[in-house]
Image: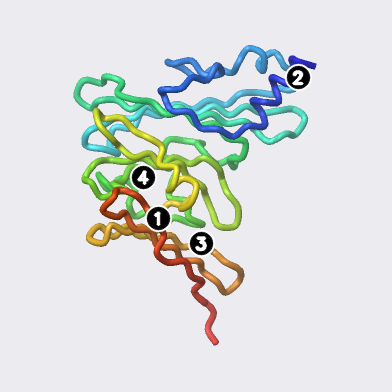
Amino acid sequence: MKWTFIILIFLISCTEKHSNGQLNTIESDSIKVDKTIAMSDNIDSNITLECIQRDLSNSFDFRIKFNRILFQNGDNDSCIIKVYILDKKTQKELDSILITSRFMYENVFKNCDNFRSFITGKNINNEALDNDFGEFIVADLNFDSKDDIAIINDSGGNGGVFYNFYIQGENNTFKLDKYLTDSMVYFPSEMIKNKKMLITYVHAGVCGLGEQKFIYNSTNTWRMISDKIINTCKE
């Protein structure tokens, strides 16, 4: 019974850990499944993808590892994303980010092409269907002229993809912005620098489009200033 309980904690939880924390299922230099889970007869196979991205930032390179664990009994896959943030010149590891998720469509992290950068212009003109701006995005989210990061954490529902948002702080380290991650959720369709405003648009029924506006104020905190439904159907 104890062994089963340990497995269920890993499979059910959908958590995020920064590099300052610890998670026994991940090693610092690679993605590996916890030995307890790996011994389970329910595991069908593992799918692993590693991407090196050098054209998303002028300051950093990114090594992104994705591992999908498939289960024989039809349970949702268990997905693990580990991002290593490297100094572009020295290739020294500056920080790392870890995300685990139980709901990502099969096309997520199928290849290393669905990444985007609002800093260098990489894939900037790619269409973002259902708020899918890519699995990994670099942008200046809080308008301080520093690179920030958004990473898919869930394939979402009718409104589209959910993201974790990481803001660059001191010493080239990145911290999860809980407000943007928990409240904005979707990647912004508009980023208005002179107003320090982010705007999201989400489907709201057949004729509705939900619009939410967020501003970054003088106290370096976020606040939603508008939440409305736009009627998109012609009368």
Residue at x 34% of width, y 58% of height: 215
Instruction: Identify which amino acid the numbered label 3 is placed on.
Output: Val
Q: Nearer the viewer, mark 1 or mark 4?
A: 1
Element type at mark 2:
helix
Q: Residue furthest front?
A: 219
Asked if residue 48 lies left or right of residue 97, the reply is: right
- Is label 2 or label 3 in front? 2
Q: Relative to 99, does residue 127 appear above or below in the rendering?
A: below
- Is the C-beta separation of discs 1 and 4 under 8 Å? no
Of 224 and 98, the residue lying toward us: 224
Label 3, secondary structure: give it: strand
Provide the secondary structure element on which disc 1 rests: loop
- Residue 107: percent from the left, percent from the top? 55, 41
Earlier-in-chain disc, 2 versus 1: 2
Tell me the tag on residue 202.
3
Closer to the eye: label 2 or 1: 2
CA–CA distance between discs 2 and 1? 40 Å
Q: Quadrant of residue 147?
A: top left
| Residue corresponding to mark 2 | 4
* Residue that mark 4 sits on: 116
With 125 as the anchor, is 144 left or right in this view? Answer: left
Q: Farthest residue toward the bottom?
A: 235
